């Protein structure tokens, strides 16, 4: 990869003019800036990433602030550790001061010292991320900085850490390795895999704060190949410590059904998302927002009864009664645990048809016919039941039905 090649790739990518403006502003303010990490990696792999990481020799926060004024962006975050996040419409750009990092003990936050852009590359996770290109403003783009052999590893589709202590220093890299390997369809280099296994065995990952661990897991579940990443968690002995029992094939089979279920339910306008549904399948309530978890738990615990009710539901109103109170994520979970299409059929019918059934008469119209009072609700429910079962095709049928019931009620028949 020559300087010209990488320059051409950058000139032709959608973020080209933005990168040029970042470089020009860095030069004006006497600092140096380079695009680094995943953006360069993906560019070399032929995919343009939306996420841009900029490393700065000088103050990253000052540069981000200047650019936010110049480009009418919004400085979302600026931390005392010399990092800043700039939002330009939908696009987010991370700025970080070039630094070296030293870890006092595994899992600790690093002690940070300012450094040059090339030195900064040595603190990174994988060789394919230890890549940078300086942004030279009007002079275009600098040569590709690749001190760790990242381009060679990209060619061999191989993920390799930079030094033996990398996973111990920052155990989140264990999860990053599995996530990235699955996304890019890369294999772990032999020594890296060995070190990954050792790091897992030494249990250092248990020191990751729950917030950071959650972030890593969420990122993993956001990947298209998240089930395969779960299988890797199992293969490396991380699945059971995180989620309880081991990932059996039967269980993995359920996870494979999550995305089609999300597609079906969201297509029907019901709020079901992948991580929530995966969380239910894994019985990992910690993956769900706490309020949602509390809300849906009783419905999950009732599912054996619900399945029995559904099995005996010989008329539509019984399907409706079994499912109407169940929150959408639990409905989707029930859909997944059903043994076969036959068991799924009433759920599909409820979702597609029955939950939309409403009597033509309103409660007020029923009250006008029957007189107001507690019987209105009862009449409405009876009306809905008959409607669900297809016994009242017209509004006139509904009126007659209410009239008859109201009359029976005045004679003590209700
Ligand atoms: N990085 C690291 N160690 C970590 C997290 C991040 O070395 N624990 C470095 C990597 O060089 C990475 C860069 O910081 O490329 C930016 O991090 P992030 O945006 O999380 O990674 P990307 O490589 O951009 O990955 P993605 O494509 O998932 O955004």
Image (cartoon, rainbow, N blue to C red):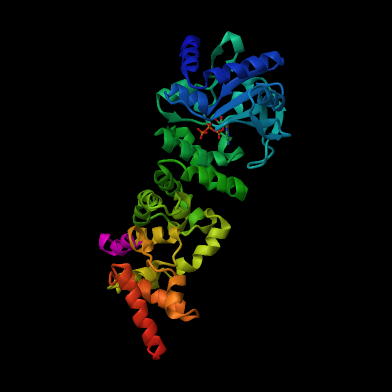
Residue lying farthest front?
A: 368
Quadrant in which the C terminus is drawn: bottom left
Q: Is residue 170 above or below residue 28?
A: below
- In the image, is residue 40 part of the stretch drawn in magenta? no
Q: Which residues are magenta?
A: 340-350
- From the viewer's perspective, tell me whether residue 386 is left or right of residue 10: left
Q: Is residue 127 above or below residue 201?
A: above
Front residue (pair 146, 225)? 225
Q: Position of residue 254 (x, y in %)?
A: 36, 55
Q: Position of residue 409 (x, y in %)?
A: 40, 86
Q: Is residue 335 above or below residue 211?
A: below
Our reading of the magenta stretch's main secondary structure is: helix
Q: Quadrant of residue 245?
A: bottom left
Residue lying farthest left?
A: 342
- From the viewer's perspective, tell me whether residue 311 is left or right of residue 367: left
**Rendering quadrant holding ligand 1:** top right
Q: Position of residue 193 (x, y in %)?
A: 46, 37
Q: Quadrant of residue 135?
A: top right
Q: Quadrant of residue 215?
A: top right
Q: Position of residue 316 (x, y in %)?
A: 31, 69
Quadrant in which the N terminus is drawn: top left
- From the viewer's perspective, tell me whether residue 386 is left or right of residue 410: left
Front residue (pair 330, 373)? 373
Front residue (pair 167, 286)? 286
- In the image, is residue 348 part of the stretch drawn in magenta? yes
Query: Is residue 269 visible to the viewer in this orientation of the structure?
Result: yes
Query: Is residue 318 visible to the viewer in this orientation of the structure?
Result: no
């Amino acid at each position: 990869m020559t300087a010209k090649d990488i320059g051409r790739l950058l000139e032709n990518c959608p973020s080209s003019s933005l990168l040029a403006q970042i470089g020009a502003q860095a030069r004006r303010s006497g600092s140096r800036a380079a695009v680094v990490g995943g953006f360069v990696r993906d560019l070399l792999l032929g995919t343009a990433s939306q996420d841009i990481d900029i490393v700065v020799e000088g103050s990253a926060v000052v540069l981000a602030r200047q650019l936010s004024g110049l480009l009418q962006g919004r400085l979302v975050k600026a931390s005392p550790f010399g990092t800043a996040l700039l939002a330009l419409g939908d696009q987010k750009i991370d700025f970080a001061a070039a630094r070296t990092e030293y870890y006092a003990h595994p899992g600790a936050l690093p002690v940070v010292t300012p450094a040059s852009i090339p030195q900064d590359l040595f603190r990174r996770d994988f060789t394919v991320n230890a890549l940078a290109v300086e942004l030279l403003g009007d002079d275009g783009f600098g040569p590709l900085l690749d001190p760790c052999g990242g381009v060679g590893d990209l060619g061999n589709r191989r993920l390799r850490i930079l030094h033996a202590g990398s996973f111990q220093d920052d155990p989140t890299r264990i999860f990053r390795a599995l996530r990235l390997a699955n996304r890019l369809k890369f294999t772990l280099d032999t020594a890296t895999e060995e070190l990954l296994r050792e790091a897992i065995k030494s249990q250092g990952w248990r020191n990751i704060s729950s917030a950071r661990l959650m972030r890593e897991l969420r990122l993993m579940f956001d990947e298209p190949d998240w089930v395969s990443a779960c299988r890797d968690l199992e293969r490396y002995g991380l699945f059971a410590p995180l989620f309880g029992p081991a990932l059996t094939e039967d269980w993995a089979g359920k996870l494979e059904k999550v995305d089609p279920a999300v597609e079906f339910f969201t297509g029907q306008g019901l709020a079901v998302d992948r991580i929530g549904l995966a969380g239910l399948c894994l019985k990992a309530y910690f993956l769900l927002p706490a309020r949602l978890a509390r809300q849906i738990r009783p419905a999950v615990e009732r599912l054996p009864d619900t399945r029995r009710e559904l099995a005996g539901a010989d008329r539509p109103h019984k399907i409706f009664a079994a499912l109407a109170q169940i929150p959408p994520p639990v409905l989707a979970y029930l859909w997944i645990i059903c043994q076969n299409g036959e068991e799924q059929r009433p759920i599909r019918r409820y979702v597609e048809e029955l939950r939309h059934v409403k009597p033509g008469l309103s409660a007020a119209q029923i009250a006008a016919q029957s007189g107001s009072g507690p019987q209105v609700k009862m009449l409405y429910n009876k009306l809905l039941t008959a409607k669900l079962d297809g016994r009242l095709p017209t509004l006139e049928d509904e009126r007659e039905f209410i009239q008859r019931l109201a009359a029976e009620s005045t004679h003590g028949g209700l």
